[in-house]
Amino acid sequence: MAPPKKYKLTKTTIMDQWGNKFTCIKTWLSKQNGTKAARALALWYFCDWAGKTPDELLQLKSSYGCLDAERLLDRFVAEADFPDSVRYKSSIAVRSFFRCNYRRLESEAGKIEYVVKKERRIPTKEQRLRLYEACLNPRDRAIFCVDVCSGMALETLSKLKWRHFEEDWQSQEIPYIHLPSSIIKGHGRGKYKGVMQETFLTPEAKQVLKRYREWMTKKYRVEWNDDMNVFLCIDFQHEPLSYQSIASVFVDVSKIAGVAFSSHDGRRILQTALENAGVMENFIRKIKGRKVRGEDNPYSRPYVEMLRRKYRLIVPDLEFIRQPAKQSNKLSKDALDLFGKLNDVLETYPDKMEKFEKFILNL
């Protein structure tokens, strides 16, 4: 069952029309990562159901022994006429709201059994090409290509700057992109401290990105510099494209192409290609921007080159615009597994590794 129609607030209006009116909401959200509007909306569902403001909610927990807030949350979970997913998210938001305002609830409050059903889409090359062709302009094509080959999250795409690219990226066959903790999942806080993402672009994605830069310069007189965001609004204001706007690009393209797609699908495309090539889990986690246990030196040039060699193995799986002329040029999964294992062995012999790489590229 969907939320009642009377609920008119959305992620784009929740803060201006409700959240910004309360200091306790600002205190709570200042301690959160990710999409804060979604958390505020989840809390608003509970407040509206309970008929209380956020300040009135906190008053329910006037002392440690007072359980009025816990009982109200239990009632919401048991009685509220919302889908399980909404009640689940609202329960998490309420407990977080109280905790961040130093009114921690009992651990049993608002418990709800809910299994998140995740659709694991991995678009085929044909579907990716349909999505690419459905893009309305060079910018949207660049956003799509970067997403499906780099493993960047939606928020990261909205904060990506040219200074995150290696200095000579336009002349590199496979450009390297270093993403600091501040713009990836966790924002470097708590268990995410020190986590960075070391990823790359395929040769065809690089070309699409260069064409986008040239188009923006010619049509909208953009004078690029390293501190500018990569993806901008299509106008003469040169404003960075927001998180929500990039998400809308994927929604619009999906509708036109008739192929469901989100930024998570791009991450799955990358991970599947890396797994099929036999790349070690630690390398996959680095390229996707996830924590690697026991890591002492998360960034060094030799390490980047090692990752680039791993990434080069999966370029045939990631590229989809230029289809190979001969069927025999396609590497099977068994062949990729073999090349991955051989690549691990040859890394200890730099001179032989270089010859091996040239052999792979000339297949």
Image (spheres, grey):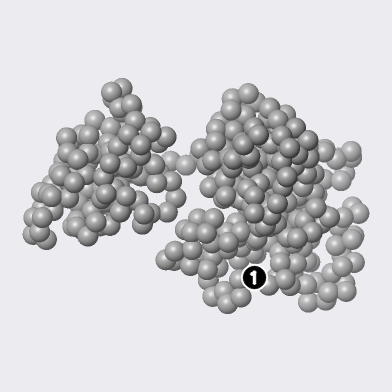
- As helix, strand or loop, the secondary structure at mark 1 comes to loop
Q: Residue at x 59, y 42 (%)?
A: 240
257 and 35: which is toward the camera:
35
The residue that label 1 is drawn on is 299
Residue 309 falls in image quadrant:
bottom right
Query: In the rendered image of this protein, does residue 100 appear above or below residue 208?
Result: below
* Quadrant in the picture for the N terminus: top left
Q: Residues within 10 Å of mark 1 (few under 14, many from 20)?
A: some
Residue 306 lies, in percent from the top left, at: 73, 68
Residue 259 lies, in percent from the top left, at: 61, 29
Query: In the rendered image of this protein, does residue 54 appear above or below residue 193?
Result: above
User: In this image, 165 relative to 106: left or right?
Assistant: right
Residue 348 lies, in percent from the top left, at: 78, 77
Q: Residue at x 22, y 34 (%)?
A: 48
176 and 221: which is toward the camera:
221
Question: Which amino acid, mark 1?
Answer: Tyr
Q: Is residue 256 visible?
A: yes
Q: Is residue 204 visible?
A: no
Q: Residue at x 78, y 35 (%)?
A: 218
Residue 99 falls in image quadrant:
bottom left
Q: Residue at x 64, y 42 (%)?
A: 231
Residue 9 lies, in percent from the top left, at: 34, 30
